[in-house]
Structure formats: C-alpha cells, structure tokens
Image: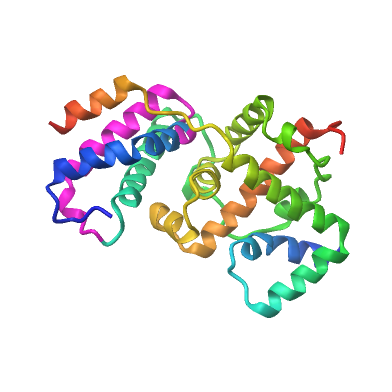
C-alpha cells in the first residue's frame, strides 16, 4: 500500500499505473459518457494533487481516489441535469417496491456458454446503465471491482448496512432487467 | 411467495455478505432449501455475480492517460 509519506506526484503516478484502468472504468459506468468519464478521472487526479495534505494514509490510495472520482462523477451528472434520482434522494431502507421486484420470475438457468457470451455481457452493461447513479456505483464497486462492503462504504461515505441496501436493490433491478435476455434460454 | 419470503428476501444480500449471525444464517439457508422462489432468487444473484466477475472492463484510453500525466507534471 502506498504511504502518505511518499512524494505526492510519485504516489499519484504510481496510482495511475496501478489503478488508472479501474478508476476510468468506474467513472465510465457512473457517467455513461467517455468524455465525462475522462474529465472525472482527470479532475480527480488534479484535485488529489492539490489536496494531497488531506490524504493521511488512513485509507489506501485506491479507495481515496475512487472517492474523489465518485464525487467528480456525481458533480458532472448533476451539471448534465438529466439523471434522477441523485444519490441523496434515494431511500436507504428496503420496502414494498423492493419486495415486488424480488417476485420477478426467475431466470431460465443460463448455461455457462450463454452466461459468458458477448450478448450477455452487452445486456449486463445496458442493464447497468438503467440503474440509478448510486446503485450503479455500489454495484460496480462491489460486484465488478470486487471491493469489500467496508471499502465501498468508505468510497461512498456511508455505513456498510446502507451499502447493502443499495446493493440489494441494484441486484433486484438487474435481475429483473436481465430476465428478458434469459427468457427462452433452455435450462 | 409469502411474507416470510419478503422478509428473508430482504436479507439475502446480508447473507451473501456474511453480515448475519449463525442462527439467522441457518434459518435463511433452511428457507432457501425449502422455498423454490427464494432459492431461484438466491441462484440468480449467484449467476449475476459470476457474470460481473467475468465481464469486460474498459481500459483508460491513452489520450486520457497522457492528459493526466500532463496535469501531474
């Protein structure tokens, strides 16, 4: 893990090498726009350099940079003004609407070759675009990047229990959105 | 599906995340084994996780990397 005592530019160059692709992929999932994703990541790095004294090494540098990219991406989404609800508007308790989604008919059991084919991967990407920004952030960090729930909570500045609520809701919505794709797949 | 299913369904992510105590885990596992609808939901979550682990990750374009390197100089 990179330490806070390392020279800021050197640490951020190294972070760009080690985590640049993950940060860009996260920004792209959040903004759904390559130009905005590029802006979010670049602004995150310049902001990290400018505010390096706020990084004291309590979290690792990847978590810290993900947190800044998330903040920049949400700012850009807000400026674009097309996407609702924004993270602060989302209900943090599971309710009847979530229960209703859980009753969506189950997927036909997808064989491995169907689960791994290009059409399925494209269907997943398209479905993720339909999640809210917060669901997309939680789901992307937890399930695609493989962060722990505690790391996701640190990136998003929320309690782990709240992360699990949004993760559960994201899973339910993706399952429902992908059910059409798997319909008719022989079990 | 029953109201038990709703309650247990809401806790499936807690179960998958290891956030429940032993007795809660045992109760949910028992329900999953007995209830086809909840068992399907659990299996769909597992397939969804596999699908995500195997999904493609876009790489940062070289031009973007160059912009960031310039900004860090």
Would residue A185 be visible to someone looking at this image? yes
- State the predominant SS element of the stretch in magenta: helix
Q: Point out the image quarter for the C terminus of chain A.
A: top right
Residue A46 on image: x %, y %: 21, 36
Count up the numbered dots: 0
In the figure, A113 relative to A152: above or below?
above
A40 part of magenta stretch: yes
In the shown orientation, is residue A151 left or right of residue B48? left
Task: Give the residue displayed 41% in from the left and 35% down from the top.
Answer: A27
The colour style of the image is rainbow
Q: Residue furthest front?
A: A113
Task: Give the residue displayed 81% in from the left and 71% down from the top.
Answer: B30
Task: Give the residue displayed 59% in from the left and 31% down from the top.
Answer: A125
Residues A39 and A141: in front is A141
- Residue range of the region highlighted in magenta in the rendering: A29-57
In the shown orientation, is residue A65 left or right of residue A5? right
Residue A101 on image: x %, y %: 75, 48
- Which of the 4 quarters of the picture holds residue B22? bottom right
- Which of the 4 quarters of the picture holds residue A75? top left
In the figure, B48 relative to B62: above or below?
below
Task: Give the residue displayed 53% in from the left and 64% down from the top.
Answer: A161
Residues B53 and B37: in front is B53
In the shown orientation, is residue A162 left or right of residue A183? left
Residue A71 on image: x %, y %: 36, 43
In the shown orientation, is residue A10 left or right of residue A152? left
Q: Which residue lies furthest to the bottom in this view?
A: B23
Would residue B1 be visible to someone looking at this image? no
């Amino acid at each position: 893990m990179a330490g806070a005592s390392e020279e800021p530019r050197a640490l951020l160059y190294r972070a760009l090498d080690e985590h640049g692709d993950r940060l860009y992929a996260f920004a792209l999932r959040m903004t759904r726009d390559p130009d905005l994703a590029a802006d979010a990541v670049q602004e995150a790095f310049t902001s990290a350099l400018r505010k390096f004294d706020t990084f004291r090494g309590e979290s690792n540098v990847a978590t810290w940079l993900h947190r800044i990219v998330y903040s920049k991406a949400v700012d850009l989404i807000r400026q674009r003004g097309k996407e609702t609800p924004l993270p602060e508007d989302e209900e943090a308790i599971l309710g009847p609407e979530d229960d209703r989604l859980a009753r969506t008919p189950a997927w036909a059991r997808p064989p491995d070759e169907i689960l791994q084919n290009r059409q399925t991967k494209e269907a997943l990407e398209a479905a993720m675009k339909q999640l809210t920004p917060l669901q997309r952030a939680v789901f992307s960090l937890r399930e695609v990047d493989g962060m722990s729930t505690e790391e996701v909570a640190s990136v998003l500045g929320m309690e782990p229990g709240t992360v699990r609520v949004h993760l559960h809701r994201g899973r339910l919505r993706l399952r429902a959105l992908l059910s059409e794709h798997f319909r008719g797949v022989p079990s | 599906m029953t109201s038990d299913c709703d309650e247990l369904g809401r806790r499936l992510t807690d179960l998958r995340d290891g956030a429940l105590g032993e007795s809660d885990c045992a109760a949910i596992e028992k329900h999953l084994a007995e209830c086809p609808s909840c068992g399907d939901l659990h299996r769909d979550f597992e397939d969804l996780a596999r699908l995500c682990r195997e999904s493609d990750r876009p790489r940062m374009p070289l031009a973007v990397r160059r912009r960031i390197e310039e900004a860090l100089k």
